């Protein structure tokens, strides 16, 4: 066992480097070539683009009107703006900071577990989080949504909380990252505040804090939020905050809005779909851990804080969102980092104990099966993305710089006549076009106007009758002007 441990010490840098290289590939491969998604990536991207164009970094808009549907503070919009500045006005710029945030989260988990539980646990935890299919593919690492940044800040806050028994400054860091998480995804950060409060109560840490400590902690948690709120109030008074409370908090909690329904087991089914093999391994590890009395061999004082904190990290979001009436699968994304830690640490303990060669072999085969299965699924999905033809058509506008700033109208041959959110963002990013909601006559009466028109017999007649000039076309439709 000692010789095996020394050999692993030597190989650790190679293992972790290989895992991080695979992570970089899974997160950034063709990141800018995949179609932009409506709900919520495109909505987020539109707001960030328009805020940047208007020079207003506090009021998010959609089609240049104040947006009271996407009721989030501005930090995630600022992240998308940074991506635009670095990579340009395109899909890569939209998603760049999400990818970086996810990679930093994986690195943060690896560093924490290595420091606290050892190198084998770090390798395994990194492997598990890297193969969390929902975390990589769904509304997080590879999309321009707020979730990747939120998970990074959620993770930073809880890890800081766990380290606070050694240095009180880590507790203040936990408070600051809570505030930043709130400024990213609003009320979702309430889970962090609940975890902090319960952790301090259950561990008895609250007894050791002075009034000065409490004052600094609350200041770290509240002052950044109040600073943003005071600036936002200057633009539209209490309207944004009223909508945040009434719609984004109360209605989402008390009723299934926008068709997002589900029972109490909704998130259990989501996790089974995306993470089911790892959960099965976790169940087996828990049985092995308790049956071998490994918990009694550990020093309680050394592990108590971490067990409580990581347990709350998993349980609170699951309970909070399970009781909320509105169910959306990506709400539980913050639980994947702590689950990865738990599985990685338990597996390392089983693998490092004496004897039980058959058990270890079965465990290693199970880990190999889970990781190869999920890596294979991620790889397949990354290489089977098909382009959205109307978006590809809109992207062609960038080929003609003279069209920049034109208005663009929509005419479909189908019943769906309104703009999709991903169409709005594509038109803005690739042509700086002003998306209009008017009809065909409004297009004819507008100077410097384009028309996105879907192919069909009606569209051919429309073009010929009105002597319209076809600028771009593909199998989906045309972009024309007068």
Image: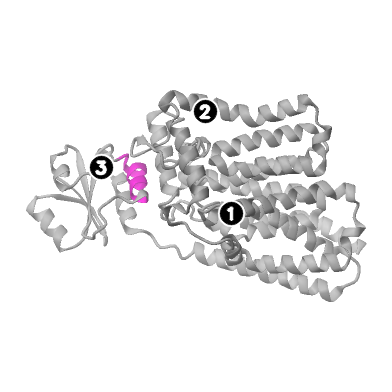
- Using the image as rendered, state which of residue 281 and residue 301 is in the foreground: 301
**Does the magenta run of residues contain 193?**
no
- Identify the secondary structure beneath mark 1: helix
Tell me the residue at 74%/52% (across/down). 311
Location of mark 3 (residue): 436
Give 63 or 251, whichever is nearer the viewer: 251
Q: Which residue is label 2 attached to? A: 229
Spatial CA span between label 2 and label 1 = 28 Å
- Residue 480 seen by the camera: yes
Outermost residue toward the left in this view: 465
Q: Nearer the viewer, residue 473 or 424?
A: 424
- Sort mark 2 into few (<14), some (14-19) or many (20+) by Cα contacts within 10 Å: some
Sequence-first disc among 1 and 3? 1
Q: Is residue 394 above or below residue 280?
A: above
Gap in angstroms between the C-alphas marked 2 and 3: 31 Å
Q: Which residue is mark 1?
A: 323
The answer to whether marks 1 and 3 mark residues whose Cβ atoms lie closer than 8 Å is no
Residue 256 pos. (x, y %): 47, 54
Q: Residue at the location (64% across, 57% down)?
A: 130
Give the CA distance from mark 1 to mark 3.
Answer: 40 Å
Counting residues from the start of the chain, the first of labels 2 and 1 encountered is 2
The residue nearer to you, when weighing 408 against 418, is: 418
Q: For marks 2 and 1, give the one nearer the viewer.
A: 1
Marking on residue 135: none
Q: Is residue 281 above or below residue 170?
A: below
Give the label, 2 or 3, closer to the camera.
Answer: 2
Tags 2 and 3 touching, CB below 8 Å: no
Q: Secondary structure at mark 2?
A: helix
């Amino acid at each position: 066992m000692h010789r095996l441990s020394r050999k692993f010490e030597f190989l650790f840098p190679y293992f972790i480097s290989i895992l991080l290289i695979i992570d970089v590939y899974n997160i950034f491969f063709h990141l800018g070539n995949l179609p932009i998604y409506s709900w919520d990536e495109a909505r987020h991207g539109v707001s960030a683009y328009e805020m940047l164009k208007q020079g207003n970094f506090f009021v998010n808009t959609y089609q240049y009107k104040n947006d009271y549907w996407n009721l989030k503070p501005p930090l995630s919009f600022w992240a998308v703006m940074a991506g635009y500045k670095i990579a340009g006005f395109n899909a890569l710029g939209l998603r760049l900071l999400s990818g970086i945030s996810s990679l930093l989260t994986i690195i943060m988990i690896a560093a924490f577990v290595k420091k606290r539980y050892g190198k084998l646990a770090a390798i395994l935890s990194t492997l598990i989080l890297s193969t969390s299919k929902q975390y990589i593919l769904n509304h997080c690492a590879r999309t321009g949504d707020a979730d990747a940044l939120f998970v990074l800040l959620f993770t930073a806050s809880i890890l800081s909380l766990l380290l606070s028994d050694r240095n009180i400054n880590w507790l203040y860091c936990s408070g600051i990252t809570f505030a930043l998480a709130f400024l990213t995804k609003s009320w979702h950060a309430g889970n962090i505040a609940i975890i902090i409060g319960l952790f301090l109560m259950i561990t008895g840490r609250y007894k050791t804090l002075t009034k000065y400590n409490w004052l600094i902690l609350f200041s770290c948690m509240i002052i950044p939020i109040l600073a943003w709120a005071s600036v936002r109030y200057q633009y539209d008074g209490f309207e944004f905050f009223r909508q945040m409370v009434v719609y984004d908090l109360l209605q989402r909690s008390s009723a299934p809005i926008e068709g997002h329904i589900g029972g109490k087991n909704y998130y259990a089914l989501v996790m089974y779909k995306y993470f089911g093999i790892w959960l099965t391994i976790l169940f087996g590890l828990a049985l092995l851990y308790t049956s071998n009395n490994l918990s009694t061999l550990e020093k309680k004082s050394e592990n108590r804080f971490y067990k409580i904190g990581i347990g709350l990290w998993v349980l609170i979001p699951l309970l909070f969102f399970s009781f909320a009436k509105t169910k959306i699968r990506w709400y539980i994304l913050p639980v994947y980092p702590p689950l990865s830690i738990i599985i990685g640490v338990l597996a390392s303990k089983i693998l490092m104990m004496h004897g039980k060669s058959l058990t270890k072999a079965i465990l290693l085969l199970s880990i190999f099966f889970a990781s190869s299965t999920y890596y294979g699924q991620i790889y397949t999905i990354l290489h089977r993305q098909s382009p959205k033809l109307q978006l590809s058509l809109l992207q062609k506008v960038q080929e003609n710089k003279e069209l920049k700033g034109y208005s663009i109208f929509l005419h479909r041959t189908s019943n769906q006549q309104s703009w999709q959110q991903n169409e709005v963002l594509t038109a803005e990013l690739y042509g700086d076009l002003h998306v209009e909601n008017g009809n065909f006559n409004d297009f004819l009466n507008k100077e410097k106007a384009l028309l996105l028109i879907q192919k069909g017999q009606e569209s051919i007649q429309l073009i010929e009758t009105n002597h319209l000039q076809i600028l771009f076309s593909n199998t989906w439709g045309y972009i024309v002007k007068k």
